[in-house]
Image (tube, helix red, strand yellow):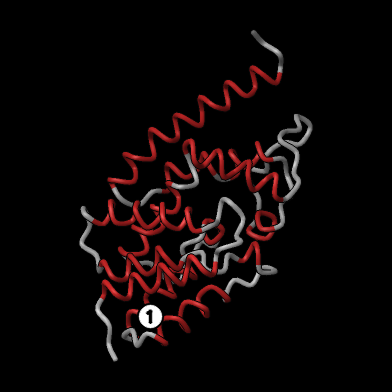
Amino acid sequence: MTISDAQLIEATIDFVKTELKHAEGGHDWFHIERVYKNSLSIAKYENVNLTVVSLAALLHDIADPKFHNGDEALGARIASTFLLKHNVDSEIIEHVTQIIDNMSFKNSFDLNTAFTSKEMEVVQDADRLDAIGAIGIARCFNYGGFKDRALYNPDIKPNLNMTKAEYKHSEAPTINHFYEKLLLLKDQMNTKTAKRMALERHNYMEGFLKQFYAEWEGKL
């Protein structure tokens, strides 16, 4: 039996909510919901397949490798199994799983990206927007606490030339992550809409860091 796109999206939302019920706070259902909403907002100005965008946004972190022993293929496998169960067209499944496999920031370390599409650009932008600004700051420190990392250590400098493997296994203080990822995202946005949204969030992070260092040094 074939279900409508609306029914498929609702089924996907229910599935993701259940799967991520006990997820870390920065990668839980509410993160997915924000990325989904951002994706829909950006997609209004892009010529994309909205079903692909919606499904990819909802399923993009169904099994984040950080929480699954580094298994970078698990998320796409889970998404594919779920979509097959709902008789989704094979071309859509292939597109969605390719987005899941290729949209992560860590893949930016690979100079020759294996896959890209306008749909991926939209979802990637939406995900990166959720990594910056006020929410990005909150998520960054939430994950740092989850991993029991130091807030800041002046003796440990950010690694601005790390490899993909170094990025994946980094245990640096949370503040370093701003320089190693978050402050880089503004210039990596794909769409005009995301670039505009990213600028304000980027500026907010720079203001936060200025205040953070002033307080760290005890400046009045």
Vertical order, 83 against 13 (above or below): below
Q: Residue at x 66, y 68 (%)?
A: 70
- Within 10 Å of disc 1 (Cα), the crowding (few <14, some 14-19, many 20+) is many
- Element under label 1? helix
Q: Quadrant of residue 142?
A: top right
Residue farthest to the top, as pictured: 220
Vertical order, 121 against 143 (above or below): below
Q: Residue at x 56, y 45 (%)?
A: 139
- Point out residue 71 in the picture as x, y percentages from the top left corner: 64, 72
Q: Residue at x 65, y 64 (%)?
A: 67
- Locate residue 61 relative to residue 218 in the image: left or right: left
- Point out residue 78 in the picture as x, y percentages from the top left corner: 52, 78
- Point out residue 44 in the picture as x, y percentages from the top left corner: 21, 54
Q: Quadrant of residue 109?
A: bottom right
Three-letter residue code for mark 1: Ile
The residue under label 1 is 93
- Point out residue 80 in the picture as x, y percentages from the top left corner: 45, 81
Q: Quadrant of the N terminus?
A: bottom left
Q: Quadrant of residue 27?
A: bottom right
Q: Residue at x 62, y 55 (%)?
A: 24
Q: Quadrant of the C terminus?
A: top right
- Locate residue 206 relative to residue 8 in the image: left or right: right
